[in-house]
Image (cartoon, rainbow, N blue to C red):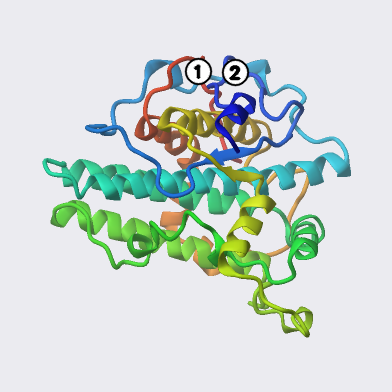
Amino acid sequence: MSLSDTAALSASPPRSARWEFGGHLYGLEPLALPPTRLPRPAGHAPGPLPERLVPHPPGRAVDGLPPTSESEVERLFWFRWITGHQTTFILWQLLAAVLDEARRPGADPDALARGARALVRGYSLMLLYSGSPPRPLYERVIRGPIARMHPNLSGSWARDYAGVRPLIRGKTRLGGEREAAALAAECELNERVHRGIAARLVPSGVSLLLDGEVRRGERPLGRDTLRWLYDGIFLTTRAAVSHEAVTGQLLRRLHAILLDLSANGLHPACAPSAEQEPPDLLGDDVLALTAAFPETLLGLAAIAGPPGAGQPLAGASPR
């Protein structure tokens, strides 16, 4: 994407409490992120949640959002898969920027650790959100089409994860003893959620990457090519975009996700699941995480930085 192409970027914060994303209900929008690290404004620190982002009763804002046909159900979960991953990429960029800022002279490590903890929690919620389809629907609507794009797709190809992997894996410490311990516990919770979603969707444990049936005779692509392919699957391009443009794109996605949750809940009644949740998703801490879904997403708006415009985001009550 060239600088002239950024005029086509949807980065304006939502202007109302109604659906504004993707041009139609559960439509998709391309995402633009920096090719490497997101520049974080000097001195930026998490602030209080702006009043105009406080959730309010959605009322008629969710009218017409529940799917009424099989094709609409499929579109809903494809939206969740793509938009949930895009939101995760933004959170990884913001988290890497927090870690970079922690290395600056005069940084407040405890405040940054609290911001990092909120971003990791948001990442955990996006795992739950993206991984919410029933298993048969996941196989038909998500895993099958992605396997046709590349039979051995792997999350290890995600360009933005490298900057946060050491923190998530417990190899980086941030903050004083109390804040560092809380952040480490949040990362451990994230790992359990990740394992739980993997067990929920692919109980065999055989990911696309490990599926030997589709690798015979293949000539592996280079790592940089795989990263471009992974970005392309999730409608993500790389450009010299500003921090404000990235956070605007985040707000648009949070707004759409909150409206979806308001209308459908995390596990929609239109797509009931017959599978029992894996043990990793039944712990009290995971249940508490799910119960606080809307408040956590709204808090991410404060972590990212107050928007320059917009109306209140719609509240949500996952069911």
Taking depth in this image into account, of 105 and 208 the one nearest to the observer is 105
Please state the horizontal and vertical placement of residue 306, each as a whole percent of the image: 38, 23
Frontmost residue, 193 versus 16 = 16
Seen from the viewer's position, the closer of residues 251 and 226 is: 226
Q: Residue at x 68, y 24 (%)?
A: 62
The residue indicated by pointer 2 is 17
Q: Residue at x 21, y 47 (%)?
A: 102
Q: Earlier in the sequence, mark 2 or mark 1?
A: 2
Q: Position of residue 253 (x, y in %)?
A: 57, 34
Q: Is residue 186 visible?
A: yes
Q: Quadrant of the C terminus?
A: top right
- In the rendered image, residue 163, in percent from the top left (x then y), is placed at 39, 57
Query: Dividing the picture into quarters, in which one does residue 173 lie?
Result: bottom left
**Do the CB atoms of the residues marked 2 and 1 lie less than 8 Å apart?**
yes
Quick one: label 2, few (<14), some, or many (20+) residues within 10 Å?
A: many
Q: Which mark is residue 276?
A: none
What residue appears at the point 31 percent right and 66 percent down from the top-left corner?
170
Q: Is residue 97 above or below residue 310?
A: below
The amino acid marked with disc number 2 is Ala
Callout 1 secondary element: loop
| Whether residue 282 is visible | no
Q: In this figure, which residue is indicated by the disc labeled 1? A: 312
Q: Residue at x 47, y 14 (%)?
A: 309
Q: Quadrant of the N terminus?
A: top right
Left or right placement of residue 190 versus residue 79 in this view: left
Compared across the picture, whether 194 is left or right of 154 comes to left
Task: Please tell me which residue lies in front, 183 or 174.
Answer: 174
Q: CA distance from mark 2 to mark 1?
A: 7 Å
- What amino acid is labelled 1 in the image? Pro
Residue 149 figure quarter: bottom right
